[in-house]
Image (tube, helix red, strand yellow):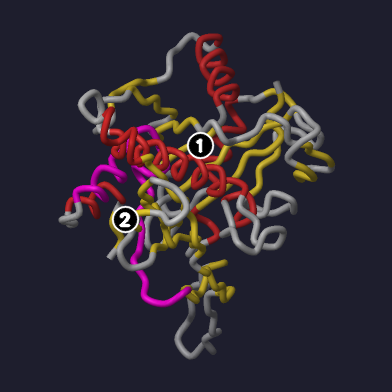
């Protein structure tokens, strides 16, 4: 069963874990909605759905033609992400009347964990760094032409609303659960909506944050989607050196895009006193990966230039 991080933290008795999860989830549109499957072992092998079987009409006595869906077998390996948080014992003893220093240091480490996850969620590439899991850019494969890669223009161009609608239509089996884009792209989308004589729908999410919608789909803003992509020949050739960005349309769930996590989910492990300095250490770690169970549940609009 897939659970979001916020839901999973409610089932834990570890108050430190609950605090870490709340810190991570609160400001992340991705982690607020991305469900996770807890797995035992170091990875998950699954069949990614590529296409549906065909169905036809037949007369009495006709020979029936067999048709099966096509799959690609994929293995997603859990990766180890985390860091150590050290608290000086002298500062802890003398400053805790003002602030719980250990809690503050662990909170900052949790924010760093969130930022690293969100960056890897977009740009993770196990072929260039085997310690990472594959992110959206690699799972969709924006460096090659395909039905899930929509192009504004062969070498990039200004965003047009029709292309955004085409991106939404590229996700099959229902609308996307999120449109994920950079802040620059969100500003351009707002400008286009005003030019068209309308405004983008706005509402509050469960955390009290204002969130915008396009065609009923929530808009998520990521500080980790770069505006420096290079697009040539209708594909992304690099993530730096240009002036283009990408919008991702994603469905979340066990049959779509889902996170994978090891037993214990996010862990804040007290390691105790250090030998070489007067300090105590807490290790914040997460065994995590991404799995895209169906290729048609995610799409990318590339070449969004300024």
Q: Secondary structure at mark 1?
A: strand
Q: Residue 197 in the image: x percent, y percent?
A: 49, 9
Give the answer, above or below, for where 152 lies relative to 66: above
Q: Is residue 22 magenta?
A: yes
Give the answer, above or below, for where 295 lies relative to 68: above
Q: Residue 59 in the image: x percent, y percent?
A: 48, 81
Residue under the image location 34 percent in, 66 percent down: 38
> On the picture, is 242 further left or further right than 211?
right
Instruction: State yes or no: discs 2 and 1 in contact (Cβ < 8 Å).
Output: no
Give the answer, above or below, for where 305 lies relative to 282: above
Q: Of 200 and 79, which appears nearest the observer? A: 79
> On the picture, is 180 further left or further right than 258?
right
> On the picture, is 9 further left or further right than 162?
left
The residue stretch that appears in magenta: 15-42
Q: Is residue 128 magenta?
A: no
Q: Which residue is disc 2 drawn over?
A: 270
Residue under the image location 42 percent in, 41 percent down: 109
View extreme (right): residue:
233
Q: Of 113 and 45, which appears nearest the observer? A: 113
Looking at the image, tell me whether mark 2 or mark 1 is earlier in sequence order: 1
Q: Residues within 10 Å of mark 1 (few under 14, many from 20)?
A: many
Residue under the image location 59 percent in, 58 percent down: 132
In space, the residues marked 2 and 1 are separated at their CA atoms by 35 Å
Q: Which residue is disc 1 drawn over?
A: 180
Residue under the image location 38 percent in, 51 percent down: 281
Q: Main secondary structure of the magenta part?
A: helix
Can you tell which of label 2 and label 1 is closer to the viewer?
2
Q: Residue 225 in the image: x percent, y percent?
A: 60, 35
Q: Residues within 10 Å of mark 2 (few under 14, many from 20)?
A: few
Give the answer, above or below, for where 39 lies relative to 235: below
């Amino acid at each position: 069963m897939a659970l979001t991080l916020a839901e999973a933290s409610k089932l834990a008795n570890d108050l430190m874990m609950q605090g870490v999860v709340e810190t991570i989830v609160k400001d992340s549109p991705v982690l607020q909605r991305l469900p996770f499957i807890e797995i035992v072992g170091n990875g998950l092998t699954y069949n990614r759905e590529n296409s549906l079987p065909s169905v036809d009409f037949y007369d009495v006595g006709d020979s029936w033609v067999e048709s099966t869906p096509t799959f690609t077998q994929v293995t997603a390996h859990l990766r180890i992400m985390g860091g150590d948080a050290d608290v000086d014992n002298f500062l802890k003893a003398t400053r805790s009347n003002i602030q719980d220093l250990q809690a503050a240091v662990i909170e900052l480490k949790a924010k760093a964990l969130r930022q690293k996850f969100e960056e890897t969620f977009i740009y993770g590439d196990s072929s260039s760094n085997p310690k990472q899991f594959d992110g959206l850019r690699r799972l969709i494969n924006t460096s090659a032409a395909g039905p899930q890669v929509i192009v504004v223009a062969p070498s990039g161009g200004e965003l047009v609303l029709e292309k955004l609608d085409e991106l939404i239509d590229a996700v099959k089996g229902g609308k996307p659960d999120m449109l994920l884009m950079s802040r620059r792209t969100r500003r351009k989308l707002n400008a286009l909506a005003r030019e068209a004589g309308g405004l983008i729908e706005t509402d509050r999410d469960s955390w009290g944050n204002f969130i915008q919608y396009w065609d009923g789909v929530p808009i998520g803003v990521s500080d980790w989607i770069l505006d420096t992509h290079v697009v040539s020949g209708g594909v992304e050739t690099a993530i730096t050196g240009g002036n283009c960005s990408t919008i991702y349309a994603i469905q979340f769930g066990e049959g779509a895009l889902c996170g994978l996590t090891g037993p214990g989910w996010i862990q804040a492990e007290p390691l105790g006193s250090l030998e070489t300095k007067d300090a105590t250490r807490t290790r914040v770690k997460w065994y995590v990966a991404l799995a895209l169970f169906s290729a048609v549940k995610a799409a990318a609009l590339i070449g969004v230039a300024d």
